[in-house]
Image (cartoon, rainbow, N blue to C red):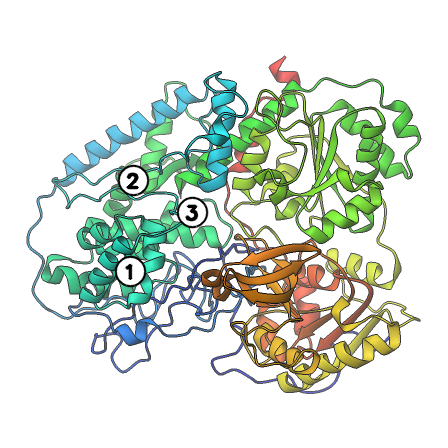
Amino acid sequence: MTALPGETPGTVGTDTPQDTVSPPDTGAEGSAHADAPEAPGATEPPGDAAGAGEPAAEVSDAEGGQADTEDAPVGSPDADSAPAEVSAGSPDAEAMTADAETEDASAGSPDVADADADAENGSAGSPDANAVTADGGAEAPAVPELSEAQAELAAQRELRERIEKRKAEKTAPIAAGTGLSGTAAELLAAVRAVESGEKSGTAFFDSPAPAPATRRPTPAAAQPPRAPVPAAAPQTASPEALDAVRAVLVEGGAPEALARPAVGVLGEQAAELLRTDPWQLLAVPGVRPEQADGFARALLGAGCGPDDGRRTAALVGWLLERAALQGHTALDAGAVRAALAERAVGDPDAAVRNAVEEGVALVFQEGDEPAPDGEEDEEGAADGAGLAEDADTDREPAQVLLGLDRYALAEESLADGLARLVNACEKAADWAEAAAAAPSPSAAELIRTTAAAGLVAHSGGEAARAEPAALIAAARGLGLRALGATHSEDGRRRLASAVGDPDTAVTLAGLLSGAQGPGRDEDGALALDLLVVLDAPQLDVENAAVLVEALADGTRLVLSGDPGVLGSAGAGRVFADVLAARACPQVVSRTPDPGPIGELVSGIGIGELHQVDAPGKEVVIVPVRDAGEAVHRTVQLVADSVPRAFSIPAEETQVITVGHGGAAGTRALNEALKQRLNPGPGRFGGFDPGDRVVHVPAPGRAVPGVVRSADAEGLRLDCGGVPVVVPQERVESSVRHGWALSAHQAAGMRWPAAVVVLPGDAAQGLSRPWVYTAFGRGERHLSVVHGVDQALPHAVAQIPAQERTTRLRPLLEALPTPDAAS
């Protein structure tokens, strides 16, 4: 085998301008990004104190439309902190439509098509050079405010009420799922309606969709009312609503292109919302705080300032949403206050208090148990959130977190549901024979453990996937309704083949939507006795909550996956939290991954990158000097070398690289591969029949496919034998060429051959989970186009998975065990 990475000679590429892969996001490992419609945003007008003479701030990737992450980590200091006032003026409409290069080079930052965040200057939360600036103009009119003492007393009363309410709710079933939307909300509503006897198991699904949730308005004494904002976007926007929003956007100097995404996020009343509260524009993907500030100044003039309650509440929500894109379900309150201060907020404590009162954020205390009378709980929460200060106390406050209600409710619902499965399961005595007939000791252990527990965590590599397959086959042999759910269609086919029955495997998305699986029983629950979820690290907290609530008491749930791979695209770290909390029996596979690729990947998993014996050239290192050579050698490998040496056609070889932008990112590689493998004019919106593509039907799901044709209905794809029609208005934001993918897009799938491209400008985007995931995608052959010199072994040895801030682990640890409950 060619010398391993780090031992190859040659210079590292120096492609740094504009298209270079961005520095790693110092937020959570596996940052989560949601695919969204194209949303050009607003930029600061020229002439601002901090932004004069500087290029307009990038807003969103015109191809992906996802909010960028140009800022430094939440709470981190920035030398270019924003001044204390908001300058007058309107945003530059032309600059607001700028096409931003968005990349996912951060360690573990997941990709959803090209909807990844631009992390060129760090991660979410800190201001950039074009942050809100001062102009010394007219001050905002006086707004009635409570005194500091009155505000503190009111805040403490509010906290005590919340604490008592949450304590009371601990003894009652958790009303979970109210923070979810779309199909997830409908599914949860259906389950609750059936369980209460209000509706039959089928009636709910024929009824109209539930009304969207609204946000509590701001007290009139403090700020103008904040009109309700729907939590779920309408499927279609009326022409009247679009025209009204366009008028408001033009009046504020924003581009009309924002009209459709604004209506999609804010609902039919978007025009009224934006006029009374211009900072609601921050809810549109791709719009940044300084751009929303410019829009607000144009509409409100001198009537707004940096401490406007509408602005501060929107900023808190924006910070938490950005954190969710990085995988966090909550943020430390101190980090939020620091980020607000850097955004020119004069009183971050008051801003946090206002956001909590508004219902924009929830506050949680993590750490020590409260005192019996509850006073310590109240004081700790107030102190940590910055809502009350006591300089005389020596007690160290517990950590206080701020979170969005949708993730808080999902985590609490999930913890409650997992405890229900653990406590409702009865030990099965008739599985012994099935365990004795298992194909491996690890499979036998998994079968025996599942027979005795309602929830089981199973971990292992690719070869270990045979063990859940053996469990499913054994359970079905006992007459049980057993099913396996995977992250991708490719995983579903592999699982069905291992079990030997195509009806035993579904995709998780298909199961949750009802398109696949056994359907519902008379009580509205999934008609299953055993569900095995493979690729469990890809399970985010909201989908996990929906899934668990759909399982009836007594159903066994097995979460199976490889802890070393990149995390979920959505917020949360469900599998890692379940393992860390030791909330259930754990089975660790003793089945090693075979061959040179398996040996290489296994070493990476423990932080070691070493040479492996590959007599059949199963692993090949191709050194390159720069990004241009990396693209050239990649095309050569896919089109010539791999097909000739291994008889693997080009359509079965997958290219994987660190970022979408850059001289050797997915865009550049896909362009070069298309010219070589399927040249054409791109007559179907940039695509031709035969093009390999990746379709993103929902955030976190990347479905490979091939273009077949296009007509008035949209672009027609073949996704693993399943015909898919992508509407014309969704093609630009949800379909990309797919010869080259990012590691996050490739997670949960495998190909006969994989070519991993590591140009010099990708060094800062590497981490152990990234390398582990990318190198493990090839079944028979792995080529590494290597130009990062010592950065690769350094990443494997020194850059592990970044932590995500979540609440699931302490929630699980606080639940009573089956023995304690009895």
Viewed as shown, does residue 470 lie left or right of 311?
right
Q: Amino acid at mark 3?
A: Leu
Q: Amino acid at mark 1?
A: Arg
In this figure, which residue is indicated by the disc labeled 1?
Answer: 343
**Residue situated in front as seen by the camera: 620 or 401:** 620
- Where residue 349 sits: x, y (%)? 26, 46
* Disc assigned to residue 331: 3
Which of the two discs, 1 and 3, labels the residue nearer the N terminus?
Answer: 3
The answer to whether residue 744 of the structure is visible from this angle is: yes
- Where residue 819 sits: x, y (%)? 66, 17
**What separation in Å lies between label 2 and label 3 (alpha carbons)?**
20 Å
Indicate the secondary structure of the residue bearing disc 2.
loop
Q: Nearer the viewer, mark 1 or mark 2?
A: 2
Q: Nearer the viewer, mark 2 or mark 3?
A: 2
Answer yes or no: do the residues labelled 1 and 2 have beta carbons within 8 Å? no
Q: Amino acid at mark 2?
A: Arg
Viewed as shown, does residue 594 lie left or right of 85?
right
In this figure, which residue is indicated by the disc labeled 2?
Answer: 215
Q: Quadrant of the C terminus?
A: top right
Vertically, is 493 above or below 518?
Answer: below
**Residue situated in front as seen by the camera: 691 or 736:** 691
- Where residue 540 sits: x, y (%)? 56, 44
**Residue at 24% of width from left, 34% of height from top?**
155
Which of the two discs, 1 and 2, labels the residue nearer the N terminus?
Answer: 2
Q: Quadrant of residue 589?
A: top right
Q: Quadrant of the N terminus?
A: bottom right
Which of the two discs, 2 and 3, labels the residue nearer the N terminus?
Answer: 2
- Where residue 784 sits: x, y (%)? 74, 73
Answer yes or no: do the residues labelled 2 and 3 have beta carbons within 8 Å? no
